[in-house]
Image (cartoon, coloured by chain):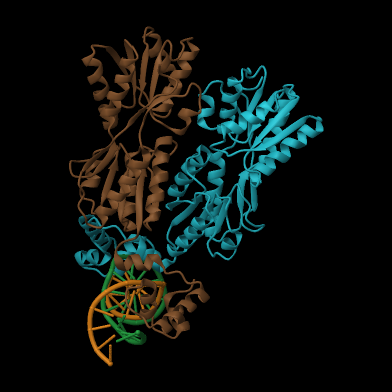
Chain colours: A brown, B cyan, C orange, D green
DNA sequence: TTGTAAGCGTTATCAC
DNA sequence: GTGATAACGCTTACAA
């Protein structure tokens, strides 16, 4: 690998000059500049980012911690994040905490080792202390670490409201809410919004916690069986909703005639399977973009308007509601 | 951020000594060692990996290029790769080429800038030339760049054979193969295997290229309609198979009574939707693990046994075949 | 066993 | 406009 010295030697100039033409910061005589450029192509020289980073104390690397990867919502998020990060000439170090506190702490240390410029955190297992005295800018997605650490999330309360209003409007009288783990802020907010509407209409509802991505079919059936007269279901993920659809069909209930079902996330699959899922659409696009843009502001020392940003969700009516 | 100098000062030793205790390479007096250790904790010092990398000319970063992220197979692969990479104290820089040659070339340059230690390539758009004179070890997944550049992939030929044998054994007489893009090696191999069996049994079959992750439902229906007597379908991805199931049901064909369908990948979802998909299971676990382990060997300058490794696939019989 | 100092590939501050 | 050179934080001969 050619270094700046090699280029300098070949172009018969000093390394300083080479550095100047690379960084386009200062004027360089057009002729010498061409000499340097020629040498660069001749040697197919690429500047060593590590050396540059060492000096500048920034790495142009963004670290992201996710609780797992095989979940559609996270992946959509990751895809837009990678895209926006790259477009700003940063790069992504992806870390999968596997919902494990120790792994997460280790990653945080790795981030310090690499002089990472900023962290995007999508995680529920955080040891708040680990983050409080971290000198690296952070933005959390779907999670509020502290009052001060910025976050973005969908307007989950609104999501709960929209789902409840739809179910109520469509005549549901006995409703089940299959939640994600109720320790999560997102889940709590959805529940609050959902309940607020149902209570207003004095409609019974029953909540049950499930895993977002691999809910137990047995649990679902048990709950459905012990609430046989249920005519509406709100699920905190489309995957859950998919499972509920299966269970309902297995039990001979017609959708949406007998039971109406609303999911959450609007994953790509929700409109290919049959019946097509009615769902609350989160915009991973907006969340991801906002996360990166905000983080970049933080990195540049700019102030941000809202510490805890909420992104609107929408109700998408398809075939599992009337 | 504390540096090695700060630690040295605090422990009243030289930076060399500190470096020695960090790297555990040379003997250090146990008492001074303790002094250093104390200073390290007191200052919560973490060594700067960038500086270390600059000197050692290795970054402990592995770069991975994927053609896109929102595809279950890639994500499962990414998940195991991240896990294995991390367990070896390397870290992952994730790059999404979006099936775009220019993006891919740019990432390659980024990899050089960061002194990346090795590259995992899951991509179809490669400009072979870009890789041939790259000094960085590479392993390709599902793709053979050149004779020399190592690769891993499923035994796709075997996958085609298994699918065809099953369909034939179950009495199918008129079979459609919905392929992925036939420019891909994986697709070509599956087709070869598939056809080899059908030809042996003198069974007609018809191939049609689709997109792996977002196949056009219109195209599928068109093909099905113009092959109305079709009683068996082999799809190159479970997502395709899912779409085919929808289309078939829409047209009133019963599964598996009228048509039998076999997918490819064995994604998690294939066993939650109804009917549960019969499919060819690729082991992302094995492929991912092999890829990382081989890459690490390459990095360490060790030789590898097989340049182009194939991993066995299995037929998983569920509800879309008899 | 420990310290000194050179060097990794950059950038930036001086001079000239 | 351009060239020396110190510095970034670390590792490793080479000395002591």
Q: Is residue A268 left or right of residue B239?
A: left
Q: Residue furthest top?
A: A229
Q: Is residue B14 above or below residue B280?
A: below
Identify which residue, A291 or A255, lies in the foreground: A255
Seen at 57% across and 31% down, the residue is B217
* Residue A60, position as x, y percentages in the image: 35, 59
Identify which residue, B114 or A32, lies in the foreground: A32
**Location of residue A52 (image quadrant):** bottom left
* Residue B229, position as x, y percentages in the image: 72, 23
Q: Is residue A132 left or right of residue B172?
A: left
* Residue A5, position as x, y percentages in the image: 43, 79
Kindly tell me whether residue B26 is visible in this rendering.
no
Q: Is residue A166 above or below residue A57?
A: above
Identify which residue, B9 or B26, lies in the foreground: B9
* Residue B59, position as x, y percentages in the image: 42, 60
Seen at 47% across and 24% down, the residue is A276
**Location of residue A178 (image quadrant):** top left
**Location of residue B137 (image quadrant):** bottom right
Seen at 61% across and 51% down, the residue is B151
């Amino acid at each position: 690998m050619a270094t700046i010295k090699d280029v300098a030697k070949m172009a018969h100039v000093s390394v300083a000059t080479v550095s100047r033409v690379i960084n386009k910061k200062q004027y360089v005589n057009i002729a010498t500049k061409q000499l340097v450029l020629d040498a660069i192509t001749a040697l197919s020289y690429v500047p060593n980012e590590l050396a540059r980073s060492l000096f500048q104390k920034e790495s142009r690397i963004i670290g992201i911690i996710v609780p797992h990867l095989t979940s559609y919502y996270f992946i959509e998020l990751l895809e837009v994040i990678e895209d926006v990060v790259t477009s700003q000439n940063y790069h992504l170090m992806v870390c999968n905490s596997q919902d494990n506190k120790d792994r997460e702490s280790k990653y945080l240390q790795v981030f310090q080792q690499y002089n990472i410029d900023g962290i995007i955190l999508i995680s529920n297992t955080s040891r708040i202390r680990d983050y409080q005295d971290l000198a690296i800018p952070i933005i959390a997605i779907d999670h509020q670490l502290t009052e001060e650490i910025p976050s973005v999330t969908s307007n989950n309360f609104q999501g709960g409201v929209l789902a409840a209003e739809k179910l109520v409007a469509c005549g549901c009288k006995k409703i089940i809410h299959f939640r994600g783990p109720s320790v999560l802020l997102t889940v709590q907010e959805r529940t609050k919004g959902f309940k607020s509407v149902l209570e207003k209409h004095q409609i019974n509802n029953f909540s049950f916690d499930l895993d977002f991505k691999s809910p137990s079919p047995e649990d679902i059936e048990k709950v459905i069986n012990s609430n046989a007269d249920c005519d509406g279901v709100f699920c905190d993920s489309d995957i859950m909703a998919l499972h509920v659809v299966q269970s309902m069909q297995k039990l001979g209930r017609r959708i949406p005639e007998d039971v109406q079902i609303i999911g959450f996330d609007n994953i790509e699959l929700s409109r290919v399977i049959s019946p097509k899922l009615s769902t609350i659409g989160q915009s991973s696009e907006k969340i991801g973009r906002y996360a990166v843009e905000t983080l970049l502001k933080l990195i540049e020392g700019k102030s941000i308007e809202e510490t805890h940003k909420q992104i609107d969700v929408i109700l998408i009516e398809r075939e599992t509601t009337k």
